[in-house]
């Protein structure tokens, strides 16, 4: 994962993978990303798909009371995967979080 982390005015942090292109405003930095399950080669295209893979890895759905979050935890770890409830907002920042917490299981690729 390379790039620059940028703090937005609304307190959100995001990864800018090509800061020079963003400053120029040419839009070339906005390559779409996809999360791939390495064992099957399956592209994660929905939360239903992701949830099944995570369950097989020992993750459980966590109901923390926030309707804007879709969360998973593992009993054997302190890790928590927290995702926006709207899958259309599932971006590379969330994908890389899943990759870090599940080494050698997932990979983020350009579309």
Image (cartoon, rainbow, N blue to C red):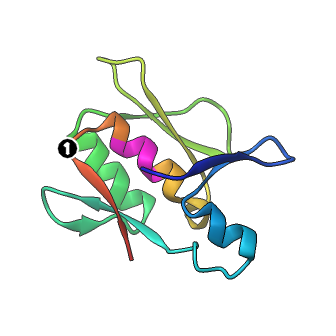
The residue drawn where x is 29% and y is 51% is: 52
Give the quadrant of residue 86: bottom right
| Location of mark 1 (residue) | 104
Circle 1 SS class: loop
The residue drawn where x is 50% and y is 74% is: 31
Left or right of residue 53: residue 46:
right
| Magenta part, dominant SS | helix
Left or right of residue 89: residue 40:
left
For the C terminus, the image quarter is: bottom left
The front one of 102 and 64 is: 102
The front one of 96 and 25 is: 25
User: Number of numbered discs present?
Assistant: 1
Give the quadrant of residue 35: bottom left
Q: Where is residue 66 in the image (x, y as percent from the top left)?
A: 68, 37
- From this view, report whether residue 72 is shown above or below residue 40: above
Q: Which residue lies furthest to the right in this view?
A: 9
Q: What stretch is highlighted in magenta?
A: 95-99
Whether 91 is among the magenta residues is: no
The residue drawn where x is 64% and y is 66% is: 20
Q: Where is residue 46 in the image (x, y as percent from the top left)?
A: 43, 65
Left or right of residue 40: residue 25:
right
The residue drawn where x is 30% and y is 44% is: 54
Q: Position of residue 72 (x, y in %)?
A: 44, 35
- The residue carrying pointer 1 sits among few (fewer than 14), some (14 to 19) or many (20 or more) residues within 10 Å by Cα, namely few
Q: Where is residue 17 in the image (x, y as percent from the top left)?
A: 54, 60
- From this view, report whether residue 73 is shown above or below residue 92: above
Give the quadrant of residue 28: bottom right
Left or right of residue 33: residue 84:
right
Q: Residue furthest left?
A: 39
């Amino acid at each position: 994962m390379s790039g620059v982390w940028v703090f937005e005015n609304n307190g959100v942090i995001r990864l800018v993978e090509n800061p020079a292109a963003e400053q120029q405003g040419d839009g070339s930095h906005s390559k779409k990303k996809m999360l791939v399950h390495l064992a099957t080669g399956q592209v994660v295209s929905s939360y239903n798909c992701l949830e099944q893979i995570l369950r097989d890895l020992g993750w459980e759905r966590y109901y923390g009371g926030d309707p804007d979050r879709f969360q998973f935890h593992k009993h054997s770890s302190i890790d928590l995967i927290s995702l926006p409830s709207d899958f259309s907002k599932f971006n590379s920042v969330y994908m890389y979080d899943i990759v870090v917490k599940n080494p050698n299981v997932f990979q983020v690729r350009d579309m």
